[in-house]
Image: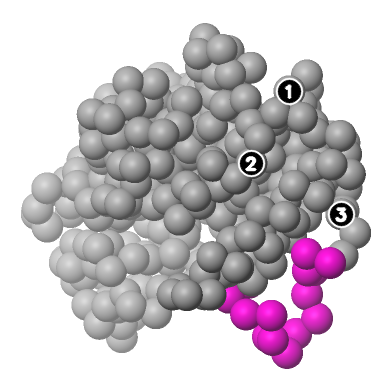
């Protein structure tokens, strides 16, 4: 049983982030999970703070908080001392000795020299730019994309591709026949082509615009919030395009069940969690090829490079009646589950002597 001190990029919550999912699937280990620090100690909102008792969200995991981020400049040294002291005190309270230090941001690299540890795992959440120094100082590096791995493996040979996982059990529900018909889709004419998840600035909505105008008998449904900087003007006002922003993430399979086709419009640089979730539904998928992981699944995902190809891919996907492709998509989704990702991570860490 290993001891892990994890400095996560998102708080432990009802909507788990990447580190929470990985830590929750390492049940053989004892884990101190530190929420990211607030920007200020004076937020005006009563929040979980570094002065509070630790919480036990699940067996083997203690959730803790950090002090506010050290301010840049002269006072940063004192802020860092305080942060390191808080972490060491928490380690002493639970008799942690030389734990695995699990970091998620290059700004945390200074802690390597401040905390007793047996190994450093760097899970690179953001861009590889600026992460080279921490990658070089780490025992093992995990990357979410092949582009990250290509950059960071230049400075650390123990760099491993660990993509985000699929919520297989949740999204596999979309294959069930007994789900109720969702209220939000009443009066929506089929066939329905849907996208589940937040739109980004790089989402190719011009492709949807072209298809919606060429085929007014098709309906395009977008589940989830609109990103503040995403340009929705290509599709706003089209009669066969509907936005359903208030649909809870956990309810989305009920809607996806009614989709004839799932759309994956992420552009270059987007992470593939949504694609893996969509594979878990078994539904036909049309993707634009800029999304890095889509090329890996060209046997079961329709790839469109132009607006004309997008329209033709949608047409083929609507007409698809191929049990083999359904079965293969489900197999890909299951292989990409968070449970499978955690096993990948643990095997790699065992190979490298971290666990």
Q: Residues within 10 Å of mark 1 (few under 14, many from 20)?
A: some
Q: Is residue 130 visible?
A: yes
For the residues labelled 1 and 3, the Cα–Cα distance comes to 19 Å
**In the rendered structure, which disc, 1 or 2, sits on the residue that comes first in sequence?**
1
Residue placed under numbered mark 1 in the picture? 2
Residue at x 9%, y 53% (from the top left corner): 306
Horizontal and vertical percent for residue 111? 56, 47
Residue placed under numbered mark 3 in the picture? 54
For the residues labelled 2 and 3, the Cα–Cα distance comes to 19 Å
Numbered circles on residues, count: 3
- The quadrant of the picture occupied by the N terminus is top right
Residue at x 44%, y 64% (from the top left corner): 198
- Residue 301 quadrant: top left
Range of magenta residues: 38-51
Q: Which mark is residue 115?
A: 2
48 in the magenta segment: yes
């Amino acid at each position: 049983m290993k001891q892990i001190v994890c400095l996560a990029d998102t708080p432990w919550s009802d909507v788990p982030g990447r580190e929470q999912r990985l830590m929750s699937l390492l049940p053989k280990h004892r884990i101190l999970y530190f929420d990211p620090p607030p920007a200020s100690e004076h937020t005006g909102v009563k929040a979980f703070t570094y002065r509070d008792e630790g919480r036990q969200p699940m067996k083997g995991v203690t959730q803790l908080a950090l002090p506010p981020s050290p301010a840049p400049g002269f006072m940063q040294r004192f802020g860092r001392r305080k942060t390191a002291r808080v972490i060491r005190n928490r380690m002493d309270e639970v008799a942690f000795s030389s734990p695995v230090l699990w970091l998620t941001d290059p700004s945390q690299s200074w802690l390597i020299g401040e905390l007793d540890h047996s190994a450093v795992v760097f899970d690179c959440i953001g861009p590889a730019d600026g992460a080279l120094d921490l990658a070089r100082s780490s025992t093992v590096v995990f990357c979410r994309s092949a582009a990250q791995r290509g950059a960071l493996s230049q400075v650390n040979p123990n760099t491993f591709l660990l993509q985000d996982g699929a919520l297989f059990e949740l999204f596999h529900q979309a294959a069930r026949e007994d789900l109720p018909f969702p209220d939000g889709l009443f009066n929506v004419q089929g066939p329905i082509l849907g996208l589940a998840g937040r739109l980004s600035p790089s989402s190719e909505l011009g492709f949807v615009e072209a298809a919606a105008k060429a085929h007014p008998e098709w309906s395009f449904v977008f589940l989830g919030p609109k990103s503040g900087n995403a340009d929705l003007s290509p599709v706003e006002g089209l009669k066969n395009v509907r936005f359903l922003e208030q649909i809870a993430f956990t309810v989305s399979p009920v809607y996806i069940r009614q989709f004839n086709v799932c759309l994956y419009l992420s552009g270059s640089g987007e992470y593939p969690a949504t694609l893996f979730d969509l594979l878990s539904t078994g539904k036909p998928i049309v993707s634009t090829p800029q999304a890095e992981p889509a090329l890996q699944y060209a046997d079961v995902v329709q790839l469109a490079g132009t607006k004309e190809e997008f329209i033709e891919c949608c047409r083929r996907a609507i007409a698809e009646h191929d049990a083999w492709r359904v079965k293969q998509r489900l197999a890909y989704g299951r292989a990409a589950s968070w449970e499978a990702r955690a096993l990948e991570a643990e095997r790699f860490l065992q190979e490298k002597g971290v666990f």
